Image (cartoon, rainbow, N blue to C red):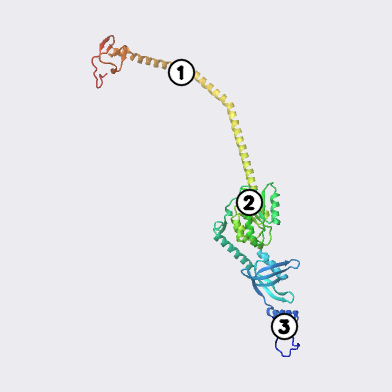
Amino acid sequence: MTLIKFSPGFFYPSGGTRRVRNTYIYPMSSPIALSALSLLIQETLQRRFMQERYWVLAEISNHSFYPQKGFHYFDLVEKAGSSLKAKIPAVAWSPGAMQIAAFERSTGQKFQAGIAVCIEVTVDYHPVYGLKATLQHIDPAYTLGQLALARQQVIYRLLREQPDMVWLEDEQLCSFNQQLRLPAVMQRLAVVGSLQSAGLEDFRHSLEENPYGYRFSVDYFDSRVQGEEQAAALAGTFEKIARRSLETHTDYDAIVLVRGGGAATDLLLFDQFETALAVASAPFPVITGIGHQKDLSLADLLAYRSLKTPTQVAESILQHNRQFEQAIVQLQGGILAATQRRLREAMLALTEIRAALTLQPARRLAAQSRAIDHLGGKLPALSRARFKTARQQVEGIRRLLAMASPEKTLERGFAWIEKEEKIITDPDALALGDSIRIRLKNKIIHSHVEQKTATDGPAFNL
């Protein structure tokens, strides 16, 4: 059904409204130009919002910056979940652009789409460009607070859902990756970053053109390292590194995560849950160089080591290997010095032995000669004394032998018994009826054994 309005000059005798074939016809005032209506809206809004300023909480969207003019164009949006609740176009002219520059300097955060802001605006309406909010001031603390709150929520989630990978120790955030150890020499590296970035090129140049002549085996894994929406993709790159290691049966000495600088807001990627967990649980030590100059990201806090720039990461790896080389050179020098010292000591000892061997025989011969001369003077007297002593000993032995001779024994009244021309010393060797001979001093008595009587105690007392 169509509604049509006519001016009062239209002839309609009955007045009121009239329905013609499903069409309503209304009488109306004289029409005005669109520009007139726009001016009316502009005047109305100016009267309402003139000299008024409002602090607004919103999120930046559709941001564009024109450096030649120094102007920022963006939308202020408010969301309810994933749906859009409100949207107002906004602009920052030169004074507002100066406020944005001060905001970026003080916070290290880039003014860009996706960040939450608290800004002071005035409301303007232009007949051609429509409604706009003009930025007058911006509160850095609010944006930093929102970022800090989001980061703290990620930390709580990591501690709650991944206690084996992330934990607190003496109020310090710790990770599984930090418990790993770098090898004494780093040679095989997995490098994560944008292959087209200047930061990765700086890293490559510093590593390959090092003054020490070190050579490395490097696998590059291309990955976008800007934009918080890339967190899942970056975590997938870490998984790809682990798969490559399993497939090739090789371990990387370290994973290097680099980024070529930029505003700190670009670091929001490294405060996301997926990125932080990928770094904390990586099977090889992670070294970060993501181009920040102020606060550390969660990826930095959970990595094995964090440095400011890709170049510093390369220099750190070179110095790590350099320290090992210097330790080896120092050890080599110590071994050489110790060997030379031992050789000098051995040569000195050998010299002393040679000198001793040269002098000692003469000294020994002289001493022996003196001893011989001394013995030579004493030898006749010693010989006479020894002979006299020997004669006395021989005479004593002769007398003992004479005293112990059988004749002397028989003379003392003793006798012995013989059987079959053998001296019997064992009475059991005689049996009753045996023929025996009893030898005395001058006689031999022939007899037979008629009786054997055992004796108790000594037979006689001499």
- Contact between marks 3 and 2 (CB within 8 A): the answer is no
Report the residue at 68% width, 80% height from top.
Answer: 48
Q: Nearer the viewer, mark 1 or mark 2?
A: 2
Which x, y percent locates residue 134? Answer: 70, 73
How far apart, in angstroms, are the residues tagged by discs 1 and 2? 100 Å
- Report the amino acid beneath label 3: Ile
- Contact between marks 3 and 1 (CB within 8 A): the answer is no
- Contact between marks 1 and 2 (CB within 8 A): the answer is no
Q: Which element is circle 3 on? A: strand
| The quadrant where residue 27 appears | bottom right
Which x, y percent locates residue 52? Answer: 67, 77
Classify 417 as above or below 59. above
Residue 255 visible: yes
Which residue has dot 3 on it?
A: 4
Q: Which element is circle 2 on? A: helix
Residue farthest bottom in this picture: 13
- Report the amino acid beneath label 1: Leu
Which one is in front, 369 or 32? Answer: 32
Q: Residues within 10 Å of mark 1 (few under 14, many from 20)?
A: few
The first of marks 3 and 2 along the sequence is: 3
How far apart, in angstroms, are the residues tagged by discs 3 and 1? 169 Å
Q: Residues within 10 Å of mark 2 (few under 14, many from 20)?
A: some
Which residue has dot 2 on it?
A: 244
Q: Which element is circle 1 on? A: helix
Which one is in front, 188 or 121? Answer: 188
| The quadrant where residue 96 appears | bottom right
